[in-house]
Image: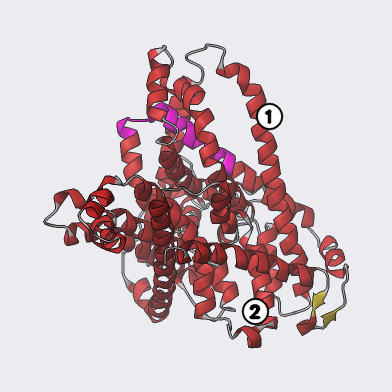
């Protein structure tokens, strides 16, 4: 039975991506019989090249993808170097799970409410410090340079990269390397950069590539914080797909493949920067300087990390205030009176959207968790950790732009609906969520699963117990806490999915995320804040249950409660 889990996981991660890319390639070259495209043609590409603002769309996708990843990586590296094992590090590590639980759309909406001309930040300094009695004239969100979009991506990428780095530190013997370098007189930041980072970076390369792919082809954050004239290319693809003129689907397919090329170009550019930094840094690694970049790490690393956390926390405060506000003119700092009227007004639409969101998230998370536990148990039984090829398969849906292969799946779904008996709706959307939930559940659970002492299983086997009994009665109770946390992470990832829900359900499913993003483009901040907070409360509830459940089930066994 354990053989089925790796096979099913590989099939789930590989087949939809490859089939989706193939489904996008046909219409991109004029082949879409449903819409009359029965001959191969380059007309979709000509129409795409004639689109006004195409160069700006491509530039925005490339710049925001590479810049946000670079900024987030620098923040994480400098913070780890300067504050490892400090109180600040311990506090930030405790905040990782709540920070990861914040969906991208909710964080983006909160950041817009915080830094907009009439946002909470400007109210704090107006009119006393700024002199403004009316909102100043600057563009946020939606600036043409994509600065708002980069900021929104960075505050969500920092927690993810920090989590991946923490999981990899034990594998590269970071503590021993740091102590050895410190004993030779190196400052903490310099010791980390010279002794730990060269071995740490290869272990987090795939997560970094996944972040680049996500940032360069993001749709939900870009729709909220990015410019609209023109928007990044991935957003344009979604607009063309939903255009009433069905002939634009040919051009949308060509644009989806172009987005794949842009992401590959961003990854290639990052790889070239890796090579350049490696060549230029060889001499620096061995020059014997013991205090290089230490002060920079203290100020820049610590300051930027806490700024990211503060921005995210202040964004949530802005969401809460707007959801309770009845009358809040600028530059008044505090809305008066506070009321639950906005929640009552939204309740008719909020409740069905919440139920649909929960049903999708629970279905995708449970199925993904079963596959992940099966894969990891297969590793344990065979005493073999997955290699580079298996890791690449795991990251495949994160490395390929979702807008490219999901668009192709929609096209094939429309053409083969009668043969596949899989119409757009709940099942299609749930399977689409699994593509993105499963990698995060695996990444969250793998380290704890692999570090469980094998002697417990050996002791159970020595008493004549079967492998199944050992798994159910010995290993599973000891792994309940990390499994619960991994499922909470999967729940948060599923709740935040916008594109799979929109495309694979053909717009038939209304979730908190789809409603929040739709409302964010309107003018009712109060209703938008209500949906964004509801989207945030569900993952927070998942993490609360994950922390509470082991203590309830193991109340008589203190060692199994964490």
On the image, which quarter does residue 163 sit in?
Answer: top left
Write down the residue under mark 2: 413
Nearer the N terminus, badge 2 or badge 1?
1
**Label 1 crowding class (10 Å Cα cut-off): few <14, some 14-19, many 20+?**
few
**Above or below, comparing residue 274 to residue 111 in the picture:** above
Expressed as whole percent of the image width and height from the top left, the position of residue 234 reads: 67, 61
* Horizontal side, residue 149 vs residue 32: left or right: left
**Above or below, comparing residue 314 to residue 234 in the picture:** above
Q: Nearer the viewer, residue 130 or 189?
A: 189
Q: Is residue 417 visible?
A: yes
Q: Secondary structure at mark 1?
A: helix
Which residue occupies 59% across, 51% down? 215
Expressed as whole percent of the image width and height from the top left, the position of residue 336 reads: 33, 62
What mark, if any, has residue 276 been given in the picture?
Answer: 1
For the record, the magenta segment spans 69-88
Principal secondary structure, stretch drawn in magenta: helix
Q: Quadrant of the N terminus?
A: bottom left
Q: Nearer the viewer, residue 359 or 462?
A: 462
On the image, which quarter does residue 381 sit in?
Answer: bottom left
On the image, which quarter does residue 47 sit in?
Answer: bottom right
**Above or below, comparing residue 77 to residue 209 in the picture:** above
Which residue occupies 64% across, 58% down? 401
What mark, if any, has residue 315 been given in the picture?
Answer: none
């Amino acid at each position: 039975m354990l053989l089925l889990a790796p096979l099913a996981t590989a099939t789930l991660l590989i087949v939809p991506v490859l089939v989706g890319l193939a489904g996008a390639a046909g219409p991109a070259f004029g082949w879409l019989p449903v819409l009359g495209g029965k001959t191969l043609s380059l007309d979709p590409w000509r129409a795409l090249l004639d689109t006004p603002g195409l160069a700006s769309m491509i530039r925005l996708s490339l710049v925001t993808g590479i810049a946000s990843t670079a900024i987030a990586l620098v923040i994480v590296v400098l913070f780890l170097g300067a504050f490892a094992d400090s109180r600040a590090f311990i506090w930030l590590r405790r905040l990782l799970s709540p920070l990861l639980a914040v969906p991208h759309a909710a964080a983006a909406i909160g950041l817009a409410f915080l830094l907009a001309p009439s946002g909470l930040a400007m109210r704090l300094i107006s009119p006393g410090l700024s002199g403004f009695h009316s909102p100043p004239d600057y563009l946020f969100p939606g600036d043409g340079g994509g600065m708002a979009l980069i900021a929104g991506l960075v505050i969500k990428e920092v927690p993810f990269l920090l989590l991946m780095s923490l999981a990899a530190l034990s594998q590269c013997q970071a503590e021993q390397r740091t102590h050895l370098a410190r004993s030779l007189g190196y400052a903490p930041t310099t010791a980390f950069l010279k002794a730990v980072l060269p071995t740490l970076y290869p272990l987090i390369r795939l997560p970094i590539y996944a972040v680049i792919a996500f940032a360069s082809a993001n749709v939900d954050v870009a729709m909220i914080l990015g410019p609209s004239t023109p928007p990044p290319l991935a957003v344009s693809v979604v607009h063309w797909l939903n255009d009433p003129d069905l002939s634009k689907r040919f051009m949308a397919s060509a644009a989806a493949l172009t987005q794949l090329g842009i992401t590959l170009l961003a990854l290639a550019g990052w790889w070239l920067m890796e090579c350049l930094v490696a060549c230029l840094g060889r001499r620096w690694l061995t020059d014997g300087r013991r205090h290089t970049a230490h002060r920079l790490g203290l100020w820049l690393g610590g300051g930027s990390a806490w700024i990211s956390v503060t921005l995210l926390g202040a964004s949530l405060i802005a969401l809460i205030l707007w959801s309770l506000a009845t009358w809040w003119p600028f530059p008044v700092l505090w809305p008066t009176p506070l009321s639950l009227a906005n929640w009552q007004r939204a309740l008719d639409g909020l409740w069905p959207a919440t139920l649909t969101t929960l049903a999708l998230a629970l279905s995708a998370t449970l199925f993904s968790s079963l596959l992940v536990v099966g894969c990891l148990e297969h590793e344990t039984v065979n005493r073999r950790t997955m290699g580079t090829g298996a890791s690449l398969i795991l990251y495949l849906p994160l490395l390929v732009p979702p807008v490219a292969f999901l668009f192709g799946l929609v096209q094939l779904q429309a053409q083969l609906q009668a043969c596949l008996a899989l119409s757009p709706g709940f099942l299609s959307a749930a399977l689409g969520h699994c593509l993105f939930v499963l990698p995060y559940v695996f990444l969250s659970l793998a380290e704890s699963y692999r570090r469980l002492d094998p002697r417990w299983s050996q002791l159970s086997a020595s008493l004549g117990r079967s492998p199944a009994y050992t798994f159910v009665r010995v290993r599973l109770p000891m792994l309940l806490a990390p499994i619960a946390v991994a499922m909470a992470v999967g729940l948060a990832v599923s709740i935040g999915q916008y594109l799979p829900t929109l495309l694979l359900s053909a717009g038939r499913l209304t979730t908190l995320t789809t409603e929040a993003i739709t409302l964010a483009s309107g003018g009712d901040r109060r209703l938008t804040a209500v949906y964004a907070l509801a989207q945030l409360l569900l993952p927070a509830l998942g993490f609360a249950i994950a922390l509470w459940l082991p203590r309830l089930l193991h109340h008589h066994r203190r060692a199994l409660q964490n």
